């Protein structure tokens, strides 16, 4: 169950992100969110994304694994996990990409949101090799 405080903090942090706040400025907010609501997959997904953008790849790997465990059908959580695995040299990326492809085949409406996220990642971190790989794999 998500507490009202965590929900409000989540919304505020998301607004700050959308306004262009640096990932490093937001990580603390999402750590607090995941501490207040440890079973809220969205908080872990966002934390992993910010950690990836901030170069905290090992932390992102842990956060993304938690997000996927809490919500295995969330394609963004799987993308984050794939990125963290690529960044840390972990094995098993293909399995997660294939799951994302299956989810998108069954729910194509999710593709626009995921593509926007990928584009956002490439704007915030131009030349992000791991993201470019994931984007190419999803397009194949």
Image (cartoon, rainbow, N blue to C red):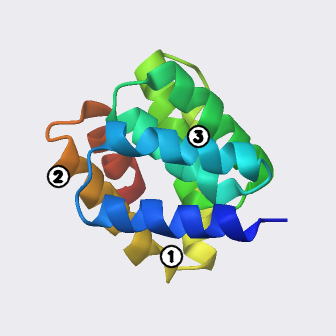
Relative to 89, is 63 above or below?
A: below
Relative to 99, is 69 above or below?
A: above
| Secondary structure of the residue carrying numbered label 3 | helix
Relative to 34, is 86 above or below?
A: above
> Residue 121: percent from the left, percent from the top?
28, 50
CA gap, disc 2 and disc 1:
20 Å
CA gap, disc 3 and disc 2:
24 Å
> Residue 110: percent from the left, percent from the top?
50, 76
Residue 97 appears in the picture as rendered = no
CA gap, disc 3 and disc 1:
26 Å
Residue 9 appears in the picture as rendered = yes
Question: Which image quadrant is residue 114 in?
Answer: bottom left
| Residue at mark 3 | 31
| Residue at mark 1 | 110
Q: Residue at x 14, y 41 (%)?
A: 126
> Residue 124: percent from the left, percent from the top?
20, 47
């Amino acid at each position: 169950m998500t507490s009202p405080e965590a929900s409000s903090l989540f919304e505020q942090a998301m607004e700050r992100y959308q306004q262009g706040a640096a990932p490093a400025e937001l990580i603390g907010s999402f750590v607090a969110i995941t501490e207040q609501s440890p079973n809220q997959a969205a908080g872990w997904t966002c934390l992993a994304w910010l950690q990836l953008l901030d170069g905290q790849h090992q932390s992102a790997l842990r956060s993304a694994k938690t997000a996927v465990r809490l919500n295995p059908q969330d394609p963004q959580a799987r993308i984050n996990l794939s990125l963290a695995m690529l960044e840390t040299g972990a094995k098993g990326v293909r399995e997660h990409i294939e799951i994302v492809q299956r989810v998108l085949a069954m729910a194509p409406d999710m593709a626009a949101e995921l593509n926007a996220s990928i584009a956002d990642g490439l704007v915030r971190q131009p030349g992000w090799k791991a993201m470019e790989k994931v984007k190419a794999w999803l397009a194949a």
